[in-house]
Amino acid sequence: MTERRMLLWLFAACWCVLLLSHNGGLSGLDGETFYQAAKSAVDAHRLDVGAGFNSTTGVGGLQYAKSSIGMPLLAAIVYAISAPVAWMAPSHSYIIRTGIVGASMTFIMAALVVAVYWLARQLRSSPGTALIAAIGTVAGTFLLPYSKEFFAEPVSALGLAIAIGCALSDRPGSAGAGLTVAMLARAQTVLVLAPLIWVVIRRSGMKGALAAAVPIAAGAALTIAYNVARFGNPLDFGYPSEGFTMPFLSGARMLLLEPSKSVILFAPVTVLLPFALVRLWHRDRQAAVLISSTAAITFVVAALWHNPNGGWCWGPRLLIPAIPSSLAAIGPWMDTPFRRMLAVGLFAVGFAISAPAVAISTQIQQLDVPPPAGGVWPPDMGLPGIRRQAELVAPTATYTVEHLFERTADGRNYLRYIVFWQVALARVFGPRGLLLAIAASLGLFTFAVWAATRCRRAYLALPSCSSDAGQT
């Protein structure tokens, strides 16, 4: 019970911190498309979206979002919940509702911290090292900027972490539900079904496998129905000219060695994974097989995709689904002071690398190069880069201070300003917006500190935690 209370306060503290740094909207085309799909479904009871979004032609010659059903479904739920807020300020309905939908990703990321902690504990990590792995996974890797984007990969990562943890703790029904969430966000995750069911059978028997299969079957049926309704084909997700056409070695080189996409550069702590997984193999072979196979499947699928770099995005976005569950394995590996210091140091480097992508939009680097025809960035274009992102922080901050209350109606303000919702409020509402932003930020910060204090108090009350507290 004490540990559950600690996790509750951990979630609250992380969520408040992530909300403090959110951009207050939807900055990318994918997020805008999911929002429009949700708006169409809730307001007009239609599945199609308007022209100009990340869509393709489907049933009836209409435009439909390219994606699995997961992200439009998440956006629709949040959009529906936000309706009362929009009624109170109808003239700013779009700003409010896109901000709330976009900010829902901070909830996913805070939940991901808790899920990684819990998984690390299932792998027999101490509370202290599990906390290092959990917080470091989000704060110390390239996942951090994705708390400000509305992409499917973090949702898939959360589902996989839950699925793996539940499979290892003899909760087959919940394991199936976790995999279903991951599948609804990214259909490719269905390939993890084989190793997951193998572990479920080994730990929970055939009855457990049947329990896991029920939510997975329901998710598959929902996905099929969505595809048929849009494109008349159960396996059509809206990518008629895209597919798994990249030679594996070329894709693997990009994900490992390309300076602007290398997982080792954007998540330096991943260099410890081979050692952590070998250690896990000697302690729990089923866990090692499940986590390793999940990482391998995700990597192979990403490498074979026609555009392994994931388009214009920060780091190797397509690898995100496997990163949190893999990094949970570092928790039990950090059983000596040296290993803890090494992991913390690598997480700190990862934070320093990604912090500039939290402060300013990575799309600012598009001003350095002419956009390609059709706005689709080819797989051999590796931008945005780490060094250039860091170089742009200071001039962008200076411009923000000097032009805080200016509103240029060309749709490119997100490239000129530091991308925090507080700045957006000041731009839209002037000095009153700035005062509101300051007040709201102080409230969030105060609650975050209070939640962190309660989390620490619960942590110190855990059995054998005094040694962990001294180590961490």
Image (tube, rainbow, N blue to C red):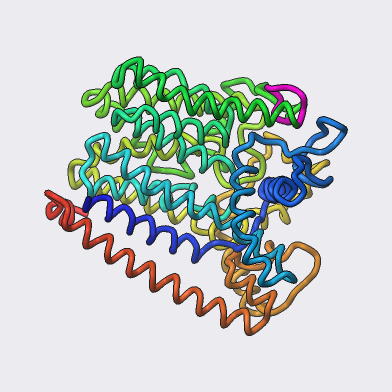
Residue at position x 47%, y 60% in the image: 18
Residue 369 drawn above or below residue 263: below
Q: Quadrant of residue 334?
A: top left
**Residue 139 position in % (x across, y down):** 42, 53
Left or right side of 204 for 55: right
* Residue at (68% x, 35% y) in the render: 380
Q: What stretch is highlighted in magenta?
A: 230-238
For the point 33% across and 36% down, which residue is it?
272
> Is 193 left or right of 258, judged from the image as shown?
left
Would you say the magenta stretch is mainly helix, strand or loop?
Answer: loop
Report the residue at 16% width, 57% height from top.
Answer: 461
Name the image quarter holding residue 335: top left
* Residue 29 visible in the snapshot: no
Compared with 235, 431 (above or below) is below
Question: Which one is in front, 247 or 48?
Answer: 48
Residue furthest to the right in view is 61
Q: Residue 276: percent from the left, percent from the top?
A: 29, 33
| Residue 176 at x, y percent in the picture | 44, 28
